[in-house]
Image (cartoon, grey):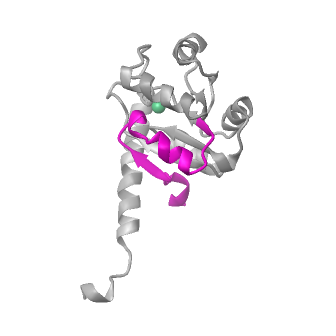
């Protein structure tokens, strides 16, 4: 059961993900979460590092689509427009529908698309359910939607369980 919550990769931030490596892995499409992945929660400002990172993404010929659970269309649109990328709002992640919609917009397939987000229960679970690669990033800020804050507690418990689960590997003969 833990497998569905396990990201394929982890990164410190969106802009620390190597675009060259994405290209080498044959990635052509990115489904990217908005709040606390691209910008601080409910903030319209896109940092210079994130802007620069998207320029590299565009230059590499990789397509990106914002897929956000945020219900306010205007808020999602402002950021996406600023970066020149399409978006899906009110996505109801971890449901799979919006991930499929995102891939359809940018014209990529499961095999060459990666989901990037800061939450296990929405971004990572949703991407994994659909069989996509997933990258978990550290949330940009502590400020969050109240529902998300509650979810973080459950997330911490899950991470603890996952660590214990992984630590329960048999000892190697050398260690004995
Ligand atoms: Mg988020």
Residue at 39% over, 32% down: 149
Name the image quarter holding the C terminus.
Answer: bottom left
User: Which quarter of the figure has residue 139?
Assistant: top left
Task: Tell which residue pokes out farthest to the front in this image.
Answer: 59
- Residue 130 can be seen, yes or no: no
Query: Where residue 165 appears, x then y in whole percent?
Result: 40, 66
Task: Tell which residue pokes out farthest to the left in this image.
Answer: 176
Residue at 58% over, 37% down: 30
Front position in the image: 163 or 56? 56
Query: Where residue 150 appears, x then y in whole percent?
Result: 40, 35
Answer above or below: position of 60 versus 24.
Answer: above
Front position in the image: 161 or 84? 84
Residue at 33% over, 84% down: 172
Query: Where residue 67 appears, x then y in whole percent?
Result: 59, 29
Name the image quarter holding the N terminus.
Answer: bottom right
- Residue 137 can be seen, yes or no: yes
Q: How many marks?
A: 0
- Please give the range of residues in magenta: 1-30
User: Which quarter of the figure has residue 68?
Assistant: top right
Residue 7 located within the stretch drawn in magenta: yes
Front position in the image: 10 or 51? 51
């Amino acid at each position: 059961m833990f497998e569905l919550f396990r990201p394929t990769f982890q990164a410190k931030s969106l802009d620390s993900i190597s675009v060259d490596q994405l290209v080498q892995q044959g990635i052509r499409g990115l489904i990217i979460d908005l709040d606390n992945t691209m910008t601080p929660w409910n903030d319209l400002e896109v940092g210079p590092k994130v802007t620069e990172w998207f320029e590299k993404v565009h230059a590499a010929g990789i397509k990106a689509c914002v897929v956000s659970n945020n219900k306010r269309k205007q808020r999602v649109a402002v950021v996406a427009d600023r970066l020149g990328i399409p978006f899906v709002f009110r996505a109801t992640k971890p449901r799979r529908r919006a991930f499929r919609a995102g891939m359809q917009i940018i014209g990529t397939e499961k095999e060459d698309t990666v989901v990037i987000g800061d939450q296990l229960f929405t971004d990572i679970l949703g991407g994994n359910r659909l069989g996509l690669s997933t990258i978990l990033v550290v949330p940009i800020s502590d400020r969050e939607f109240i529902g998300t804050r509650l979810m973080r507690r459950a997330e911490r418990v899950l991470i603890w369980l996952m660590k214990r689960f992984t630590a329960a590997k048999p000892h190697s003969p050398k260690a004995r």
